[in-house]
Image (cartoon, grey):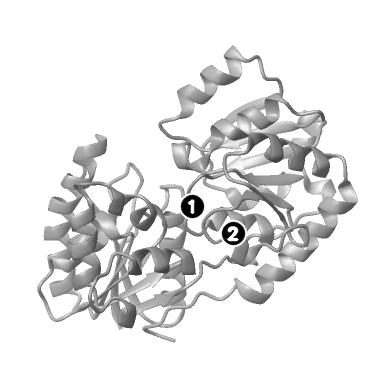
Amino acid sequence: MNICIIGQYPPQVGGVATYTKQLEDTLTNKGHNVYVLTYSSDCSRKDNVFEAKTINIPLLRGISFIISSYFILNKIVDKYNIDIIHANYLLPQAFVATLIHKDVKIVATAHGSDINILPSKIFTKPLIKYTLKHLDNVYFVSEKLQKKALALNIEGLIEKSHITPNTVDTNKFKPISDDKKKLYTKYKKPLVMFIGNLVVQKGLKYLLKAKEISKTEYVLLIYGDGPKKEELKEYINQHNIKDIYLMGKTNIPEKIIPESDIMVLPSISEGASIVALESMSCQKPLIATDTGNIQSIITNNENGVIVPVADYEKLSDAIDKLVDDEDKRNTLGKNARKTIERDYSQMKIPYIN
């Protein structure tokens, strides 16, 4: 089949960009012709990747993507005889796809805030409802997301919705031996890491507060970029919190995560975190807040640790306990890797499976 994917794509970072690349690779390896429509960037692109020009201002970015991608998508559909358009994220990506009135199947994957947040906003709620109504199939990365979408009472949605959990490449995200770890040699203390976008939803202020009241010695490395970066810097400086480093964004999480001793996901809102799966695949103990699909992948104190959302004291206590207990870290990490290998290593794509 000829398939066009719309969505964020590397070098953009984050779960949706990672998912788009995984989807492209999986479909290509199964013999399909795959084309990608994504946001503009400064890097060179492969022949099958097309860019929609955008204005990099928050409100105008989405509107400019809709206008630009609409015309490009029409050309891709006609030139390459596209059978399926697969949008990653409901707005603006899937919304644009529903405007293409051609003989092509349109499906979309909902990842998180497109269901958790956008339907609660007065301007985006009608667009989300329109999009869900006009898609041929909708894939949700967790059961929680599906239930929230069904609560919007859109006719026919239940019949065309599926749950397709995120997955991870276990050959790419895997543990490394201690002699290959470089960061511990630099910092000389246990390494606690966060990787993700620096936005409100990721709950980073609670992670900083957890470090501030910690009773143990460890280094906190925060990888990522986003609108909350300066605010985080200011908090760290004002409160004189030691051993926290903002490392900037990384395009090589598969090399960074194995260097950690503990991975942390302090989100206040989440869909289905790919970083959580990547961390577990690298055999790392993960401390995550009880949001999104965390309870479906972590059994508390067996293959990870779950703490309440926005509770920095319990987050701090959980980190301190693992910092002080290497045996526990190793046990959780090994069990986490087994969970990923068993349940989250094969991508499910309903229209080809």
Q: Which amino acid type is shown beneath numbered disc 2?
A: Ile
**Mark 2 sits on what residue?**
294
In the image, 132 versus 253, the foreground residue is 132
Q: Which amino acid type is shown beneath numbered disc 1?
A: Glu
Q: At numbered mark 1, what does the secondary structure look like: helix, strand or loop?
A: loop
Using the image, determine if residue 161 lies above or below residue 174.
below
Mark 1, Cα crowd under 10 Å, few <14 / some 14-19 / many 20+, is many
In the image, 183 versus 219, the foreground residue is 219
Mark 2, Cα crowd under 10 Å, few <14 / some 14-19 / many 20+, is many
Which residue lies most toward the bottom here? 353
Is residue 50 at least partly visible in the picture? no
Apparent side of residue 145 relative to residue 309 in the rendered image (left or right): left
The residue depicted at 49 percent of the width and 52 percent of the height is 270
Q: Position of residue 327 (x, y in %)?
A: 89, 52
**Mark 1 sits on what residue?**
270
The residue depicted at 64 percent of the width and 67 percent of the height is 170
Q: Position of residue 63 (x, y in %)?
A: 17, 46
Location of the C terminus (image quadrant): bottom left
Using the image, determine if residue 294 lies above or below residue 24.
above
The answer to whether marks 2 and 1 mark residues whose Cβ atoms lie closer than 8 Å is yes
Please identify the quarter of the rendering in which residue 333 is found. Answer: bottom right
